[in-house]
Amino acid sequence: MTHPNNDLLQRYYEAFQRGDLDTMAACFHHDVAFHEPGRHPLSGTHEGPSAVIDLFKALVERTGGTLRLDQIGALVANADTGAAKIHLTARSAEGPVAIEALELYTFRDGLISDIRAYLHDQYEWDALLS
């Protein structure tokens, strides 16, 4: 039996794959913060569900609509924290880009309250989004 927060992360990622922003937002605590790493224009901390959804919209826009979550690898969660290894793809002017990422989660009241992304190749991600 999996923890309910594991199911929450699964629902969140499946919504991301479908582009279902409403379901994604429903997974967020009202105090959610997403810490986007790097030195690109979208880097920084995005606070509140609408700011986090706006970040996702901007990521899709900056990749010309090509950003895809094509693999959800290891996904684990307990009452307080969770982690997911994911694989993203997009197209840049130079061609296809593949990004491996680890995202760490904190939960509060059964919802996602904090997200921290760690990318295998931050330089490539920065170049894609700059």
Image (cartoon, helix red, strand yellow):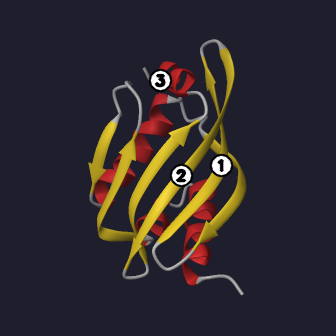
* Residue 78 position (above or below residue 120): below
Q: Are marks 1 and 3 in contact (CB under 8 Å)?
A: no
Question: 24 left or right of 39?
Answer: right
- Pointer 1 or 3: first along the chain: 1
* Residue 124 position (above or below residue 3): above
Q: Give me the residue at 30% from left, 57% from top.
A: 50
Q: Amino acid at mark 2?
A: Glu
Q: What's the mark number on residue 103? A: 2
Residue receiving disc 3? 126
Residue receiving disc 1? 86
* Rendered-image quadrant of the N terminus: bottom right
Q: Amino acid at mark 3?
A: Asp
Q: Are marks 3 and 2 in contact (CB under 8 Å)?
A: no
Residue 53 picture location, percent across and down: 38, 53
Secondary structure at badge 1 equals: strand
Q: Are marks 1 and 2 in contact (CB under 8 Å)?
A: yes
